[in-house]
Image (cartoon, rainbow, N blue to C red):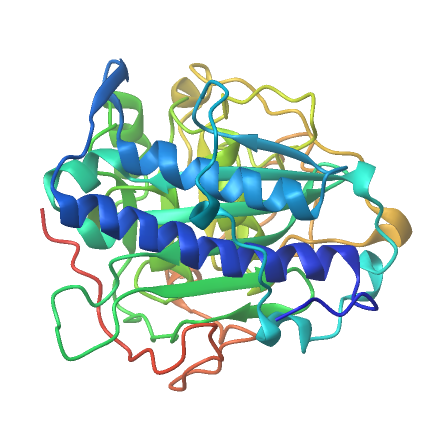
Amino acid sequence: MAANMSSSLVMRIVSASVAVSNRASQIIRDVMRKGDLGIVEKGKNDLQTEADRSAQRCIVASLHKQFPKVSIFGEEQLGPEKIPADFIELGFSEEVLNHKCPKFLEDVKDEQIVIWVDPLDGTAEYTQGFLDHVTVLIGIAVDGHAVGGVINQPFYNYQDKSKVMGRCIWGVCQLGAYGFTREVLPEDKLILTTSRSHSNRMVTEAIEALNPTEVVRVGGAGHKVLLLIEGKVHAYIFATKGCKKWDTCAPEAILHAVGGTLTDMFGITMSYGPQVKRLNAGGVLATTSNHQYFVSKVPEHVLENLEKSESPEPLPDGVCLRGDNKNCLGEVREEPETEQQPEQQMEQQVQQQEEVPGSPKGSESPSSDSGVAKENLDTKL
């Protein structure tokens, strides 16, 4: 479908990102089907496959062709190479373009936008056969703020031959998020998610400080945030310096679009501008509610091993993208206002999950991949 040029630039980019994420997902499945993953080691516990390389070439080349003035950063460092013609996807998602752009994004210009691309988030899991952990991430930032994102799961439903494989979740701040089904978390539990393969003592101690009833260890930042927005966990805790901007831009935008919050472990909103450091040196903390409570529980000695993030400048007219609508810049870590409240009552507040806008409880949201059925993700190790 050709894009309606009357649509805003941001909505056209999100629409094109949905289309190209589907093409990249097909490339990732094709590499797996052929059997030769072309694995190389970029560093310790850091793999790259032919699927990573080909998917990034597909995404970056396609988006650059359509939006040549927009800055695009991909995870993989790739040399110049002729891009196969069938890697170029110039289509658009009609579903996205049918939505009205939020007012604060209507007049955004090319130079205000940065696109962050992780062509295959969860590479280790891809090579080990944990295919439902794998995602394609395309995040759209405006003036340093994550405002739109796409999370594509190439292998969703891969174990059920009767269902269509793959699905695409997308979202825009102040519009909503689409392509998933919201579940209801049990009120008598505190379920957290964290890294399956990149944990350390600081991560463990940050989690232990919250005294969870269950910890779900899975691969990929995109996959972990999906567990949040689908109502499978209460929070995502990663109290170390492992993540990069392309890991969190798309998930942050979608999480904010449904009323959640993603910051570093200090509670500081991260900037996604063109000049920022790629490393998320302050760690990652993502929640669907009660974000400041989780921030308040991070041990001080854990924070001493992290660095406070660079925050973006505030958006015009006091627009706030974070779901808690408090401390949008998060420039200082505040002590919780309810510190005198009993611990048990605080835990009860954490366990109360609000219905997510854009994805009605018990129903299925619109998706660019029609006919997607609700299915629990396999989080067993």
User: Residue 126 at x, y = what percent?
Assistant: 20, 41
User: Front-most of 240 and 246?
Assistant: 246
Q: 186 or 276: nearer the eye?
A: 276
Q: Is residue 38 visible?
A: yes
Residue reaching furthest to the bottom: 363
Of 252 and 308, nearer the camera is 252
- For the N terminus, the image quarter is bottom right
Left or right: where does residue 367 sit relative to residue 165? Answer: right
Q: Nearer the viewer, residue 41 or 174?
A: 41
- At 44% from the left edge and 71% from the top edge, which residue is drawn? 179
User: Residue 312: x and y, percent?
Assistant: 73, 33
Q: In this view of the protein, can residue 259 be seen by the observer?
A: no
Name the side, left or right, on which 222 lies relative to 269: left
**In this picture, is 257 found above or below 296?**
below
Instruction: Give the residue displayed 26% in from the left and 30% down from the top.
Output: 49
Residue 107 in the image, given as x and y percentages of width and height: 88, 55
Rendered image quadrant of residue 204: top left
Q: Position of residue 206 (x, y in %)?
A: 33, 32
Residue occupying image coordinates x 40% and y 80%: 370
Vertical placement of residue 134 versus 270, above or below? below
- State the count of labels: 0
